[in-house]
Amino acid sequence: MLKFFRKIRQQLLSQNKFNKYLIYAIGEIILVVIGILIAVQINNWNDRRKDQQEEIILLKSLQRDLHSDMENIQLRMDRKRAMLTGFIHCLEILSDKREGTKEEFMQHYEMIMQVDEITLNTTTFNNLQNNGVIKLIRNKRLADSIVAYYNTDLNGWQSSLREYSRNNFAPYLLSYDFLPEVTFELSNIDAELQAYLNALPGNSEFSFSGKSLEDYKNNYFIINMLKFKSRNVIGILGEYKALLGDAEQLDKSIQNHISTYD
C-alpha cells in the first residue's frame, strides 16, 4: 500500500503537476490521521471493554457477598426473636403475669449470656478499597451505596450488648446462682472429649441448692437486666431489618447496573 502511494507521488512530481501533488499529499495526511484516530478509538474501546468486564466480575463477587450477608442477617434475626421471646417469657413469670416453675424460667433464662453478633462479609469490598479498583464502578450513585452499606452503624448496638453482658451481667450472675445447664453441640468432639463433658458435675450434685424462683422475683438486678437486654435486642432487630433492606436494595441496584451491559 505504501509503495502504491509512493508511486503516485513520484508520477505527479515527474509530470510537474505540483497542485495535484499538493492536494494528494494533504489527502494522504488526512487518511493517515483518520487511521490513527480509528486505531486510538479501537484501543479505547478495548480498554473500556476490559474495564467493563472487570467491573462485572467485581460486582458479581459483591453480590455473592451480599447473598451471604442476607442469609446471615435472617438467621441472626430469627435467633434474636427467639431470645426476645424468651426474655419476655421470663419477665412475665417474674411479674406473675404467667404461671411457671423455676425450671420453665431457666429454660428461657439460659439465653441471658448470648450475644450472637453479625459480621458482614467484606472480602470483595476490602479488595475494592485496598486496590483502588472501586473506581471501575462507573455508576457513582451505586459506588456510594456500596460504601454506605459497608459503613453501617450496626456495631453500636452490638457492642453495647456485648460489653454489658461481659462487664456487668456475667460477674453478677456467676456469683448469684448456678448458671442454667445448657446442652449444646460442639464441633470436633470425639469419644475422649465427650467423656470429659459427661464427667462435669451437674448443678444438683453440689451440697448447696440454688436460688428459688421467689429469689429471682425479688431481685431488682435480674429484672432490670432482662428488661435492658430486651430493649437492646429490640433495637438490634430494628437495625438488622434496616440492614437486610439495604442489602436487598443494593443487590437489586447491582443487578440493574449489570443488565445495562447485556
Image: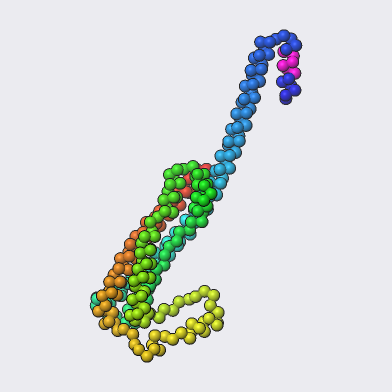
Q: Specify the principal SS of the magenta part.
A: helix
- The picture quadrant where one finds residue 174 is bottom left
Q: Nearer the viewer, residue 159 or 247?
A: 159
Q: How many marks?
A: 0
| Position of residue 6 measured from the top left corner of the image (x, y, whole percent) | 73, 20
Q: Residue 81: in sight, yes or no?
A: no
Q: Nearer the viewer, residue 233 or 98?
A: 233
> Is residue 10 within the magenta segment?
yes
Whether 53 is drawn above or below 71: the answer is above
Residue lying farthest bottom? 207
| Residue at horizontal 30 percent and vertical 71 percent from the top | 225
Q: In terms of depth relative to the viewer, which is nearer, 183 or 251?
A: 183
- The span picked out in magenta is 7-12
Colour theme: rainbow
Q: Is residue 8 visible?
A: yes
At horizontal 75% and vertical 18% (from top left) the residue drawn is 7
Query: x and y percent of residue 53 in the render?
Result: 56, 45
Q: Residue at x 53, y 81 (%)?
A: 193
Compared to 117, does 185 lie above or below?
Answer: below
Residue 241 appears at what percent x and percent y?
37, 59
The question of residue 196 being in magenta is answered with no
- Residue 226, image x and y in percent? 30, 72
In the image, residue 34 sits, relative to residue 259, either above or below, namely above
Where does the N terminus fall, quadrant-wise?
top right
Could you tell whether 223 is left or right of 132 in the image? left
Which residue is painted at 46% across and 43% down in the image? 139
Q: Residue furthest top?
A: 16
